[in-house]
Amino acid sequence: MGDGIGGAVISILTNNAFELLVSHTRKDNQESYGKVEKIIMGKIDDPNEPQYEEKTKEDLERALKGKFVSCNVQYRDAKTDALVCNVFVQRPPEGF
């Protein structure tokens, strides 16, 4: 897909999935997105910083809950209707 969305993490669902309150979308997005989307975090292959260790739901909650994140959408999972994304913690936009 290559679309981009952003917003606040409102709840942690599993050790690699959360709900995002979508407040920002890129103008050139190809798809439309709901106000709340389920996000499954895709793995990022970075040999300098391997990120393959398993995280617990609590680890993810400490790292993301209430934070503003941007998500580069890879695809929408047909079975779960969740978006598989690369996720980046951001500074909240002005006035957020």
Image: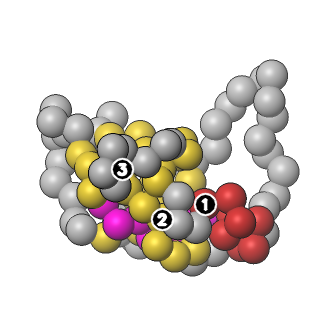
Q: Is residue 10 visible?
A: yes
Residue 9: assigned label = 2
Q: Alpha-carbon distance for marks 2 and 3?
A: 9 Å
- Which is the main secondary structure of the residues drawn in magenta? strand
CB within 8 Å, label 2 to label 1: yes
Q: Nearer the viewer, residue 35 or 83?
A: 35
Return the residue nearer the eye: 71 or 52: 71
Q: Could you say whether the residue bearing mark 2 is in a helix, strand or loop?
A: strand
Number of other residues with Cα within 10 Å of mark 3, as a class: few under 14, some 14 to 19, many 20 or more: many
Q: Nearer the viewer, residue 39 or 80?
A: 39
Q: Mark 2 is on which residue type?
A: Val
Residue at 16% across / 54% down in the picture? 32
Q: Is residue 74 visible?
A: no
Give the amino acid at mark 3. Answer: Gly
Which residue is disc 3 drawn over?
Answer: 6
Give the x, y percent position of residue 52: 79, 45
Q: Which mark is residue 77?
A: none
Residue interval drawn in magenta? 16-22
Question: On the picture, is 59 further left or further right than 93?
Answer: right
* Inter-mark Cα distance, 1 to 3: 13 Å
Circle nearer the N terminus (2, 1): 2
Q: Secondary structure at mark 3?
A: strand
Locate residue 4: give its quadrant.
Answer: top left
Q: Residues within 10 Å of mark 1 (few under 14, many from 20)?
A: many
Dividing the image into 4 quarters, which one contains the N terminus? top left
Residue 82 appears at what percent x and percent y?
Answer: 40, 65
Q: Left of 53 or right of it: where is 14?
A: left
Numbered circle sitting on residue 64? 1
